[in-house]
């Protein structure tokens, strides 16, 4: 009997190790924004803010046995970023659950005044300022003069767009250091929990025409500041997986 229990225990341990090696979880549902303390030692979460913008409200909620983060934006823009190092070549598949109440009426991927999304998954990649062309290094230096915001030099945003065709990859209207990827679009699936997947390795290569370095952070963000609207979104855990 003891031998059987020991064998079962060993199998369970090995299975959990294998799962840990095959996937990495960004614990959205284990984070409570209301209890955030930026002075907490070893804090992996940080507030993602933009200069002179009101903050989107984020709240940890459990309903019908399901735990998630609810985001409410009223002419605001901010997010929550989880600092983590991930090799996108080793873990190229990202999977997440999200829901929106509806898209932003004036959202438009092609216009600065419409650069808002009811929901987005924001992935930042390691990239050195020294690797920028001279003109972009000067531009970066000028931007840093006026803000303490940690400006990403390489990022992908998987967004729930207003009307862009699903699969569209486009430079952000404010900077070519960020590419937007329309993963969902329109209101057809609004008010439903949707599981979405993407390839963070292949998409990066297609968007930037270069080999990606390590992923440095993953964020959730709901914003409506440019379109002067309002949006509500819900986020579940984010999982990175090895390609089968």
Image: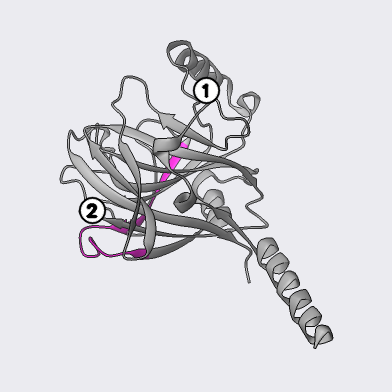
Frontmost residue, 72 versus 122: 72
Give left or right: position of 204 versus 160: right
Q: Which mark is residue 116?
A: none
Residue 189 sits inside the magenta stretch: yes
Frontmost residue, 83 versus 10: 10
Q: Is residue 48 above or below residue 59?
A: above
Residue 31 placed where, x, y %?
A: 47, 45
Give left or right: position of 10 versus 213: right
Residue 83 placed where, x, y %?
A: 57, 39
In which quadrant will I find the C terminus?
A: bottom right
Residue 221 visible from this viewpoint: yes
Residue 167 visible from this viewpoint: no
Looking at the rendered image, the disc whose residue lies closer to the viewer, 2 or 1, is 2
- Element at label 1: helix
Residue 236 sits inside the magenta stretch: no
Q: Say which residue label 2 marks.
A: 163
Q: Which residues are magenta?
A: 178-194
Residue at 38% in and 38% down: 172
Residue at 41% in and 63% down: 196
Q: Say which residue label 1 marks.
A: 136
- Element at label 2: loop
Frontmost residue, 224 versus 177: 224
Frontmost residue, 172 versus 222: 222
User: Closer to the N terminus: mark 2 or mark 1?
Assistant: 1
Residue 171 placed where, x, y %?
A: 40, 40
Number of labels in the image equals 2
């Amino acid at each position: 009997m003891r031998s059987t229990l020991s064998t079962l225990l060993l199998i369970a341990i090995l299975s959990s190790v294998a799962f840990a090696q095959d996937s990495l979880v960004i614990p959205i549902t284990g984070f409570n924004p209301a209890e955030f303390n930026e002075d907490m030692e070893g804090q992996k979460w940080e507030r993602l803010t933009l200069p002179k913008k009101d903050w989107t409200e984020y709240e940890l909620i459990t309903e019908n046995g399901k735990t998630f983060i609810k985001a409410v934006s009223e002419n605001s823009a901010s997010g929550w970023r989880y600092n983590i190092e991930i090799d996108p070549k080793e873990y190229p598949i990202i999977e997440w659950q999200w829901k929106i109440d509806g898209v932003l009426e004036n959202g438009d991927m092609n216009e600065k005044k419409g650069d808002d999304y009811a929901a987005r998954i924001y992935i930042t990649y390691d990239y050195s300022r020294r690797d920028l062309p001279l003109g972009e290094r000067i531009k970066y230096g000028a931007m840093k003069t006026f803000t303490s915001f940690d400006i990403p030099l390489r990022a992908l945003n998987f967004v729930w767009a207003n009307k862009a065709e699903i699969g569209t990859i486009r430079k952000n209207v404010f900077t070519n250091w960020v590419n937007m990827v329309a993963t969902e679009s329109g209101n057809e699936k609004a008010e439903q929990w949707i599981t979405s997947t993407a390839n963070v390795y292949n998409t990066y290569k297609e968007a930037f025409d270069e080999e990606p370095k390590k992923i440095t952070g993953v964020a959730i963000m709901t914003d409506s500041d440019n379109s002067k609207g309002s949006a509500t979104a819900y986020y579940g855990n984010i999982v990175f997986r090895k390609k089968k």
